[in-house]
Image: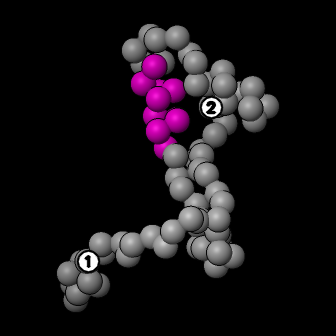
Amino acid sequence: MHLTATTLGLGLHHMNQITERIDRDTAAGHPDVFAARWATLLGRPASTGLLSFRIGHPERTPGLSPRRSLDDVVTS
């Protein structure tokens, strides 16, 4: 999905902090604020979400990902 969005000139930003916050609040016994908002916004329980993200037209060109070379991670 991310590669397709990029091909179409769109930016995609993963937002895992939403689901992490729901899990953290649940584990800590805090009020369930984010799951309720998720359900209201999307019409589905937060527990059905696998990934949330923002998508749109980037305002600037992102920098290159600091990846290691293939030789650094693959052995023969």
The residues colored magenta run: 16-25
Task: Please tell me which residue is depicted at 52% across the width and 35% down the height of the picture.
Answer: 19
Where residue 10 is drawn, which disc sits there? none
Task: Please tell me which residue is depicted at 47% across the width and 39% down the height of the picture.
Answer: 17
Q: Is residue 67 above or below residue 29?
A: below
Say which label, 2 or 1, has the lower sequence index: 2
Task: Please tell me which residue is depicted at 58% across the width and 18% down the height of the picture.
Answer: 33
Secondary structure, mark 1, is: loop
Task: Please tell me which residue is depicted at 79% across the width and 31% down the height of the picture.
Answer: 43
- Note whether residue 39 is visible: yes
Mark 2 neighbour class, 10 Å CA radius: few under 14, some 14 to 19, many 20 or more? few
Q: Is residue 11 above or below residue 54?
A: below
- Compared across the picture, whether 42 is left or right of 51 comes to right
Q: Main secondary structure of the magenta part?
A: helix
What residue is pinned by disc 1? 68
Residue 23: in magenta span: yes
Mark 1 neighbour class, 10 Å CA radius: few under 14, some 14 to 19, many 20 or more? few
**What amino acid type is highlighted by mark number 1?**
Arg
**What amino acid type is highlighted by mark number 2?**
Ser
Q: Residue 6: percent from the left, percent from the top?
A: 60, 73
Q: Nearer the viewer, residue 6 or 59?
A: 59
Secondary structure, mark 2, is: helix
- Note whether residue 44 is visible: no
What residue is pinned by disc 2? 47
Image quadrant in which the N terminus is located: bottom right
